[in-house]
């Protein structure tokens, strides 16, 4: 019973946090970046770490930083989520495209 009661509370907290983090797009460049990142992650269903994503994005715009990409991903928690894979020394943070999941819950 305890687990059943805590799951909705966690989801409510996540929803509140996503509303706080979500901000309108600042520019057309951000919209383009979101589209490119979404496409890249969509064809990588197991996710990609920030370095892999950054190396791909740098081929399109050499001025982009990994931090800029990560800040954009963090701002859109209903589109992108970060997951941990592996164990111990092989633990890796990967970003995944999750917008299709978010649409179902709204």
Image (cartoon, rainbow, N blue to C red):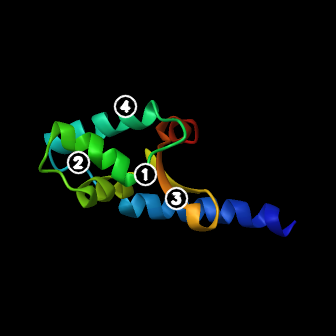
Q: Residue at x 28, y 46 (%)?
A: 55
**Most foreground residue, 12 or 44:** 44
Are the residues tagged 1 and 2 within 8 Å (C-beta)? Answer: no
The label nearer to you, 4 versus 3, is: 3
Q: Position of residue 81 (x, y in %)?
A: 48, 51
Residue appearing at x 39%, y 64% in the figure? 20
Location of residue 70 (image quadrant): bottom left
Q: From this view, report whether residue 60 is shown above or below residue 3.
A: above
Q: Left of 11 or right of it: where is 73?
A: left
For marks 1 and 4, give the CA distance.
15 Å
Which residue matches tag 1? 49
Q: Distance from label 4 to label 3 (Cα)?
A: 21 Å
C-alpha span from label 3 to label 1: 7 Å
Foreground tag (1 vs 4): 1
For marks 1 and 2, give the CA distance: 23 Å
In the rendered image, residue 8, in percent from the top left (x then y), is placed at: 69, 60
Location of the N terminus by quadrant is: bottom right
* Front residue of this view, candidates 102 and 73: 73
Q: Which residue is the site of mark 3?
A: 92
Q: Earlier in the sequence, mark 1 or mark 4?
A: 4
Secondary structure found at label 4: helix
Q: Which residue is mark 2?
A: 25
Q: Are marks 3 and 1 in contact (CB under 8 Å)?
A: yes
Task: Name the residue that disc number 4 marks.
Answer: 39
**Residue placed most toward the observer, 102 or 66:** 66
Element marked by disc 2: loop
Distance, label 4 to label 2, CA atoms, is 18 Å
* Residue 18, above or below 41: below
* For residue 80, side relative to residue 89 (left or right): left
């Amino acid at each position: 019973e305890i687990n059943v009661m805590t799951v909705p509370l966690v989801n409510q907290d996540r929803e509140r946090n996503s509303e706080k983090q979500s901000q309108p797009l600042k520019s057309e460049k951000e919209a383009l970046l979101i589209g490119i990142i979404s496409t890249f992650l969509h064809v990588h269903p197991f996710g990609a770490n920030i370095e892999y994503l950054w190396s791909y994005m740098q081929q399109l715009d050499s001025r982009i930083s990994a931090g800029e990409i990560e800040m954009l991903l963090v701002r859109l928690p209903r589109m992108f989520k970060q997951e941990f894979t592996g164990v111990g020394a092989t633990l890796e943070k990967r970003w995944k495209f999750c917008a299709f999941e978010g649409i179902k819950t709204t």
